[in-house]
Amino acid sequence: MVGSGPNGLAAALTLARAGLGVEVYEGASIVGGGTRTEALTLDGFRHDVCSSVHPTLVASPFFRSLDLPSLGVVLRQPEVAFAHPLGGGRAAAAYRSVDETASHLGGDGAAYRALVGPLVDWLDRIVAYALGPLRSVPKDPLALARFAVVGSPSIRYRTRHLSTDAARALLAGAAAHSMEPLTAPLTSAVGLLLTALGHGVGWPVVEGGSAAIAEGLVREVRRLGGDVRTGHWVHSIDELPGSARAVLLDVSPRQFLALAGRRVSARAGRPWRRFRPGAGSCKVDWALDGPVPWTAEPCRRTVTVHVGGTFEEVARSESAVRAGRHAEQPFVLVAQPCVVDPTRAPAGKHTLWAYCHVPNGSDVDMSERMEAQIERFAPGFRDLMLARSVRTAASAETYNPNMLGGNVNGGAQSLRQTLFRPVAQWNEYRTPVEGVYLCSASTPPGGGVHGMCGRLAAETALRERFSKG
Ligand SMILES: Cc1cc2nc3c(=O)[nH]c(=O)nc-3n(C[C@H](O)[C@H](O)[C@H](O)COP(=O)(O)OP(=O)(O)OC[C@H]3O[C@@H](n4cnc5c(N)ncnc54)[C@H](O)[C@@H]3O)c2cc1C
């Protein structure tokens, strides 16, 4: 195994559970990839460097197969899954209950219930597709068809019948996690699935920080006899033990080509070189003197706040990024873990985590624009700032080479790269090198902490390299 992100560790654990000997080589000095927690600002403040909010972990068949508390992974759930301030003390909010959410959406309440309610009722069946193998015979074609019908169009099209700014903004914010313009196909699938997860399983954080996820998985791999080494960058597949019967790479297609070197011909490598990295992100962490003073009450009862105003404002911000520009008023994804997890900061203090989308590889520090957006809905926020840490999209790859130009999803989650991820082939985890598999978020089901890329890649390797039949 190369790489110890959540997918690398999920793959390692899947192989170790099958009784195989596993060695994991991690380049960084600490394990976890996108699930690390570090003291980025002041003593006593612990920040999730990348991933912080974990609906896909709770829903993931891989993580559901584990006893999370025994691995030290304790989830902390906010009362409100996510909120979206609209100004004047108002906010749209995804409460845990669909009915409660709908009851706050005025004239769109019934339409919201009709759109989201069935997805929540069918959540397990839909998750089986959304987080399952892409090319397989559907066990439940009806659930697949229903999700395909509502999820295929853009979120702009899907919400065209909604009339309230609250309902439209709520779904726009969830859909913008796709890092695609709100006119792009499948943005409904992302937005509606995340919203349904908010109702069905919540949007929790991990007590003490996301690092507990990686640490728990590493402990389990080691308990089963596996070896996990840090500070060991792998520069070529040839450096790996020749005795390995399978090699799994928790890396991007670009890194795969570099690791494979001459083992991949120019022709075979062409589709891999075409893989698009997608938009980047500028990430900011703050140490705060207290909680963010949101004027809208639901924002104070949730971890995740989507800051960017109306549907049209969010759409403008995301379109600017696609056009290669930096939004003056960016859509900002904010997480305030201390609302449910006071262990992240000294008594009475808070940590704040946020990122906004920017053109790939941008070196622009967006912190002041992001702060202006937060201040807009939480006057007095700036007075609470004790320290901040900024990571531009350009510097992201230095931190983790998988973050291509600052992309958080392992590469663009466009229509093409959802259907053919990383390249068009029947089994997405295979590479042109025999016995070498890709298991990162650049394979299906893509970005997020769910470990399913790793598990499905490991299952492919088990079938192809270890099955006696
Ligand atoms: C800013 C940000 C915010 C995010 N927020 C969320 C969130 O709230 N919720 C959520 O579910 N997801 C979130 N994500 C996405 C999530 O973190 C990723 O999708 C996930 O971590 C991908 O896991 P992975 O195992 O594929 O790769 P990674 O987590 O990127 O891990 C890859 C690992 O491989 C190592 N590696 C790479 N190349 C080599 C090499 N040659 N030799 C040795 N080691 C190597 C890297 O050092 C790294 O540790 C966020 C991501 C970012 C960047």
Image (cartoon, rainbow, N blue to C red):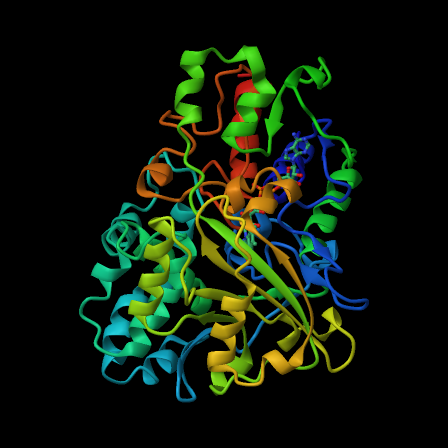
Question: Vertically, is 72 above or below 173?
Answer: above
Image quadrant for the N terminus?
top right
Which residue in the rendered view is the most extreme toward the right? 43
Q: Position of residue 231 (x, y in %)?
A: 78, 35
Q: Position of residue 444 (x, y in %)?
A: 44, 39
Tell me which residue sits at (32%, 67%) in the image. 116
The image quarter in which residue 399 lies:
top right
Which residue in the rendered view is the most extreme toward the left? 161
Question: Vertically, is 427 above or below 53?
Answer: above
Along the line of sight, which residue is nearer the eye, 141 or 303? 303
Q: Would you say 329 lies left or right of 315 here?
A: right
Q: Position of residue 429 (x, y in %)?
A: 48, 28
The image quarter in which residue 205 lies:
bottom right
Q: Would you say 366 lies left or right of 9 here?
A: left
Question: Vertically, is 343 above or below 223?
Answer: below
Dividing the image into four equal quarters, which quarter contains ligand 1?
top right
Tell me which residue sits at (57%, 57%) in the image. 283
Q: Would you say 205 lies left or right of 417 here?
A: right
Q: Is residue 449 visible?
A: no
Q: Position of residue 139 (x, y in %)?
A: 35, 42
Q: Is residue 469 visible?
A: yes
Question: Vertically, is 409 above or below 309?
Answer: above
Tell me which residue sits at (39%, 23%) in the image. 271
